[in-house]
Every structure is written in structure tokens, then in C-alpha cells.
Image (tube, grey):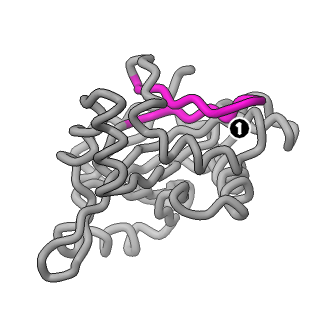
Amino acid sequence: MDVALARPVTQQPTGPSWAYEVKVDGHRTVLWRTEDGVRLQSRTGRDVTALWMDLAVAAMRLPPGVILDGEAVVYIADDDGSVHISFTAAQSRALSRPRHARELADQHPATYVAFDILAHPAAGFPDLRPRPYTERRQALLDVLADVGPPIVPVWSTTDIEEALLWFDGDVVVEVVAGPTRHAVVTVVRLR
């Protein structure tokens, strides 16, 4: 399954036909809800279901046939009580053996941050990739409405000023932008 990949740019794209999403640092995965289970696959095609079993169990609430593109992330609490996404924790899980991954999941459960829906056959969309971003975003929100955490949609806005506010602090280091009226073939990274 081909997924969109971001490329860096030097200038922020602006205008009425752009959407901006937070770029989270985790483990890129495609999530398939099959007829009888769930499969998670890394961007390189490796089956990583056993490493993210907590997400696979949660994804059983999705309708069969749904395919999501997103990031498996791990939130870690700091001593002061604040929470941040830990790329190190996500990579530790992604590179561990299944037994150790279960132990890590017990310590720090994962969240799946979905930024695209690639298929939703039950809604009449066996392949959403050619559809405009606005239609795919709405289909993503609709399918996730009854699922809830730990499977959540990525933050998104069409307001560049709001997207730039996300850079405030250490939480957001990149924002991804893509055209809303077209299928996103190229997305760009800001910052």
C-alpha cells in the first residue's frame, strides 16, 4: 500500500486550499482492519502487529476493510507531570521482540495518531487515495468518531496562523501541509 511521504520546503505554503497537520514523531504504520483481525505494517512493509498489540486490540472497533495511515506513538510523563511524545520509546518498541514489546506496552501504552484513511469499503470507498483531502479527512473523522482513544485523528486546520501557534513550546517541531482540493500526492514539512 503506497502512502504519501513528506518532503521539506523552505517556505510555508499558504492560501485557501491548504491544510496543516501536526507531524508526530513515532513509528509510521499502516493499520488494516481485516475481516477477522488487525494488521499493522511498517513503512518498509514489515509486519509489526505483535509489537503494537495494544493498538491492534483497540483497532478491532474499526469496521472491517478500513485502512489507516498514521504513527504509533508513546506518551511519557515527565517529573513535573507534563506529558510528551517520546520518539525513543516508540523506536524501542518498534525494534524490540514481541515479549519485550508487551512489557513496554504495560509501562507505556501506545496511541495511534491517524493522519489518513486509505480505504473504507463499508462507506463505499474501497480506495480513498485518489479522493481530495477534504473528503478523506471527513471519512477519517467519521470512522474514528465511535472508536476513541487510543486511536485518534491528528490535529488539523486550514488556518496557517493556528498551525504556526502549534510551534509554541517543545511539543510540535514540524507541521505537514497538503492541498485540500486534490489527492495529497505531495505533502510538505514546515520547519
Crowd class of label 1 (few under 14; some 14 to 19; many from 20; radius 10 Å): many
Name the foreground residue: 70 vs 91: 91
Which residue ends up furthest to the top in the rendered image?
45
Residue 190's spot in the image, x, y percent?
Answer: 28, 52
* Residue at image point 53% right, 38% down: 69
Which of 147/175 is in front?
A: 147
Q: Quadrant of the N terminus?
A: top right
The structure residue drawn at horizontal position 21% and vertical position 81%, both measured from the top left corner, is: 81
Check the image and report above or below for 114 versus 141. Answer: above
At label 1, the amino acid type is: Val
Mark 1, residue position: 66
Q: Position of residue 38 (x, y in %)?
A: 62, 33
151 sits left or right of 94 in the view: right
Q: Which residues are magenta?
A: 28-43
Q: Nearer the viewer, residue 133 or 84?
A: 84
Give the residue displayed 41% in from the left and 26% down from the top: 42
The answer to which image quadrant residue 119 occupies is top right
Residue 2 lies within the magenta run: no
Label 1 sits on a secondary structure element that is loop
Corner quadrant of residue 17: bottom right
Q: Is residue 175 visible?
A: no
In this orientation, does residue 183 appear?
yes
